[in-house]
Amino acid sequence: MATELRAIPGNEVALDAPMSEHTSFRIGGKADILVQPHTIEALAATMECAHRAGVSPVFLGGGTNVLVRDGGIRGVVVKIATNLSRVIVDGDAVRAEAGTRLASLCRESIEHGLSGLEFTAGIPGCVGGAVIMNAGTNMGDIGRVIRSVRVVEPDGSLVDIPREKLEFGYRSSSLQGSGRCVAEACFQLQKASPEDVHLALCEAIERRCGRQPLSHPSAGSVFKRPDGDYAGRLVEEAGAKGMRVGGAMISEKHANFIINRESATATDVLALIEAVRVRVHDQSGVWLQPEVCVLGVD
């Protein structure tokens, strides 16, 4: 299948690609085939090729909310990051390809005097993953500023989906588990003073980065926010800050982060996640739900 994928114009294909080089955790075994399409047409052709072969690709964006198991990923991984990151501004609408980093999208919007994406400051990752999981903070979420999303169906066809059909919820959308791949998204923003937007952006970055452990690899927030509470508070209250399994450790700076302290494996991280869940449940009666997407095999 690698031969067919390489024959598609705009594709970059690698065999036995270490996923530790493609995730912010710096953890994970090898993928059999890693494809990086450099155009939406190449992405669609890749999806159609996989569909004909009866293969369901695994999609990877910036790899910031992902843990790849130590055995790697069998089959095809389609990575959509800087290879698909074009942005077009049209009035108060911004269209961004799925691999556009949220930080870049936010900066581009500010340069055009557009407000609405300041809450994304400090959120790692790309547009595609952010849309699928409705990424956000206490200040807002992606679903609130989406106008429409262009997806590639499993058979390679392109479809535009309006916001009202995407069923955005807390860290969820109807795209999850659908087999569709986000190609680009259109954001509805508002005109504003570039100076005011830049100030709001700087304040948001200061708030988030002042609390997050940035000196070690991680995958961002590990647990979803439970109803009426915060995962980090519950983990800290349970005395789990600094808790370790192998090279994985609960950050002493932010209790909802697991950091790759010392050559951690996916097995270390998963064992730590489960140990923390049990400790929090014993302390508060709450079962925390992981937010990190786990891919691959042991």
Image (cartoon, rainbow, N blue to C red):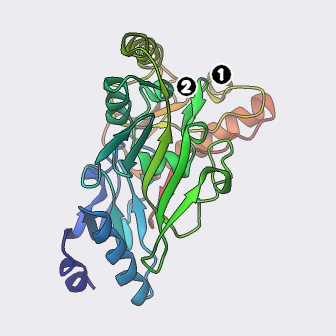
Q: Is residue 144 above or below residue 229?
A: below
Q: CA distance from mark 1 to mark 2?
A: 7 Å
Q: How many marks?
A: 2
* Residue at image location 56% in from the left, 48% down from the top: 133
User: Where in the figure is residue 100, as x and y percent of width and height?
Assistant: 34, 45
Residue 233's disc is 1
Residue 255's disc is 2
* Residue at image location 59% in from the left, 23% down from the top: 139
The answer to which of 227 and 142 lies nearer the viewer is 142
The answer to which of 70 and 256 lies nearer the viewer is 256
- Residue 239 found in image quarter: top right
Label 1 neighbour load within 10 Å: few <14, some 14-19, many 20+:
some
- Which amino acid lies under the numbered mark 1 shown in the image of this protein? Arg
Image quadrant holding the N terminus, namely bottom left
Residue 51's disc is none
Residue farthest front in this picture: 91
- Which amino acid lies under the numbered mark 2 shown in the image of this protein? Ala
Q: Is residue 162 visible?
A: yes
User: Where in the figure is residue 70, as x and y percent of width and height?
Assistant: 38, 60
* Residue at image location 32% in from the left, 64% down from the top: 40
Q: Are marks 1 and 2 in contact (CB under 8 Å)?
A: yes
Q: Is residue 63 visible?
A: no
Q: Is residue 24 above or below residue 76?
A: above
Q: Is residue 275 left or right of residue 12?
A: right
